[in-house]
Amino acid sequence: MDIKFNEADKTLEIKDGLRKNVFLIKFLMILNLINSVLNLSDLNSGNFGFIKIIWAILGAISIVILYKFIVKKSSLEKVPIDQIKGLKERIFMGRKKYFLELNNGKNRDLLEVKSESDFKQLKKMLQKNDIQV
């Protein structure tokens, strides 16, 4: 677990490479959306076939994923303590996933916290620094 509390500027430093992954996903979804719009742009030809339906579905999926990663997720590497609302966990497909809930309504996934012992250690660190968990 590579999560540290920086006392100087009161931030939680998370080094897990999430920022690069989220940027890559956003970039690919924007490219996919542009590609689907370009493939659907000649609708006045009259034939709305199977390929057009596939591109419409891919465009809709890209919009949903972009919404999720722009509005609902955060990839901050230095999270200020005053922005943290709490530490949460959810079970997805039988695996526990841990995340920080932020005051602006976004969630910061904690990829480095994989076990219950890591979760307890992080919880203890946050409680020590006056963050309600």
Image (cartoon, helix red, strand yellow):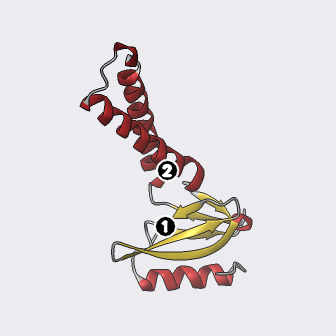
Query: Type of residue at label 1?
Result: Leu
Q: Residue furthest front?
A: 46
Residue 61 x/y as whole percent: 41, 44
Foreground residue among 121 and 28: 28
Q: State left or right for residue 110 relative to residue 92.
A: right
Residue 80 at x, y = what percent? Answer: 69, 62
**Secondary element at image label 1:** loop
Q: Residue at x 50, y 76 (%)?
A: 89
Q: Viewer-proximal residue, 26 or 59? A: 59
Note whether 15 is above or below 55 in the view shown: below
Question: Is residue 5 found left or right of 112 in the rendered image?
Answer: right
The correct choice, above or below, for 9 with respect to 67 in the image is below
* Residue position marked by numbered label 1 in the rendering: 110
Say the numbered circle drawn on residue 93: none
How many other residues sit within 10 Å of disc 1, few (<14), some (14-19) or many (≥20)? many
Whole-number angstrom distance, CA of label 1 to CA of label 2:
12 Å
**Dot 2 surroundings within 10 Å: few (below 14), some, or many (20 or more)?**
few
Q: Amino acid at mark 2?
A: Arg
Residue in the image at 38% along x and 29% along y: 36
Q: Is residue 41 above or below residue 78?
A: above
Q: Position of residue 124 (x, y in %)?
A: 59, 85
Quadrant of the rendering where the N terminus is positioned: bottom left
Residue 127 in view in this figure: yes
Q: From the image, which quarter does the C terminus lie in?
A: bottom right
Residue lying at the far top of the rendered structure? 45
Task: Point out the tag, 1 or 2, that comes first from the N-terminus.
Answer: 2
What residue sits right under mark 2 in the picture?
Answer: 19
User: Picture quarter containing residue 10?
Assistant: bottom right
Q: Are marks 1 and 2 in contact (CB under 8 Å)?
A: no
